[in-house]
Image (cartoon, grey):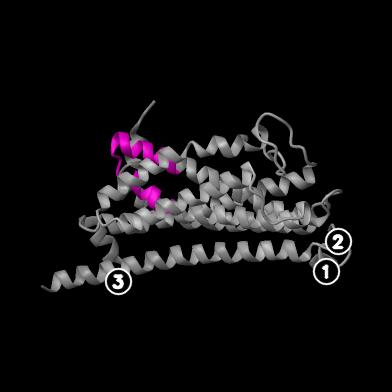
Amino acid sequence: MAFDSFSDFLQMGRHGFYVWSTYGISGVILFAIAWQSWQQKKQVKRQLAKRFIREQEK
Amino acid sequence: MSWTWFHKLGSPKWFFQFASRWSLGVFLSGVVLLLIGLVWGLAFAPEDYQQGNSFRIIYIHVPAAILAQSCYLGLGVAGFVFLVWQMKMAPIFIKSVAPLGALVALIALVSGAIWGKPTWGTWWVWDARLTSVLVLFLLYMGVIAIQNSLEDKILADKAVAVIGVVGLINLPIIKYSVEWWNTLHQPATFKLTEKPAMPMEMWLPLLISSLGLYLFIAGLAMLRMQTEVLNRERRSSWVKEEVLKNGI
């Protein structure tokens, strides 16, 4: 560990705000794009399935 | 050399099956490596003697910055491939990667701005490096806007391919911006020909988090390309089988 205690780790010297806000924002962006990519695939599959079933019933 | 792989890769069906097998594994190995690299970099790497702990922003800033450029390189090459050989997968790649590249470039810009405040005393300066990366972000946004706004899909594919190729000129500008112009920005962290300027305990976690982010985004790119393939190939019978296979 480069830090003496957990609170030291959170404080990052006097740079805690900068370091943690960077990782917070980056984490949110990465999570959001992963979630959106996943949801989009599910949604497209569902739409196509509905369409194919409708076509079969005709 | 056999070119069969090239032709296979150009087939949407083959790609879809390939990506079904690999996308999740690539994504998850990216998550694991990213976590290892970040925990190592944030908690265990030694403090920088000049910048203190603010330097730890490097573990997302540098991976994001090089990945944003790599994505654009891929996008430009795909644009060229599409314009010359009309390969079907090329516009699928461009459309799927552009939003990922835009967000990764955004991470590079935001993390750089936050890092700039304690280090340079300012969030932003209009110098060559920062401006050229902002242009990279705007190129991605242009590609996304054109894909979404043009009704004529064939025209949209061509237009973004052209932007992709033309925008490639920005990549050497980004790379050499820290050498050609006076800048606050420090020189390159990763160099192929020289030993890294930072000690191994700082550099190794950076390498791991970079690999992690590459795999993370590669996994998502494959996933998004699968979605796009389904959408574009909806009239093929294999798509119908694929979609109806698992029920709704």
Query: For the stretch drawn in magenta, what is the main secondary structure?
Result: helix
Tell me the chain of label 3: B
Other residues around mark 1 within 10 Å, as few (<14) / some (14–19) / many (≥20): few
Q: Which residue is mark 3?
A: B247
Q: Residue furthest right?
A: A4
Q: Contact, CB < 8 Å: mark 1 with mark 3?
A: no
The spot of residue B45 in percent (x, y) is 79, 52
Q: Contact, CB < 8 Å: mark 3 with mark 2?
A: no
The spot of residue B191 in percent (x, y) is 67, 34
* Residue type at tag 3: Gly
| Helix, strand or loop status at disc 1 | helix
Which residue appears at 67% of the width and 45% of the height? B207
Q: Which residue is mark 2?
A: A3
Q: Contact, CB < 8 Å: mark 2 with mark 1?
A: yes
Q: What is the magenta range? A: B75-97
Residue B22 shows in this picture? no
Image position of A24 (left or right of B158): right
Q: Which residue is mark 1?
A: A6
Which residue appears at 84% of the width and 70% of the height? A7
- Name the disc covering residue B219, or none: none
Question: Quick one: quadrant of the C terminus of chain B?
Answer: bottom left
* Residue type at tag 2: Phe
Of circles 1 and 3, the one toward us is 1
Residues behind callouts 3 and 2 on a single chain: no
* Residue type at tag 1: Phe
State the separation of the CA atoms marked 1 and 3. Answer: 49 Å
| Helix, strand or loop status at disc 2 | loop
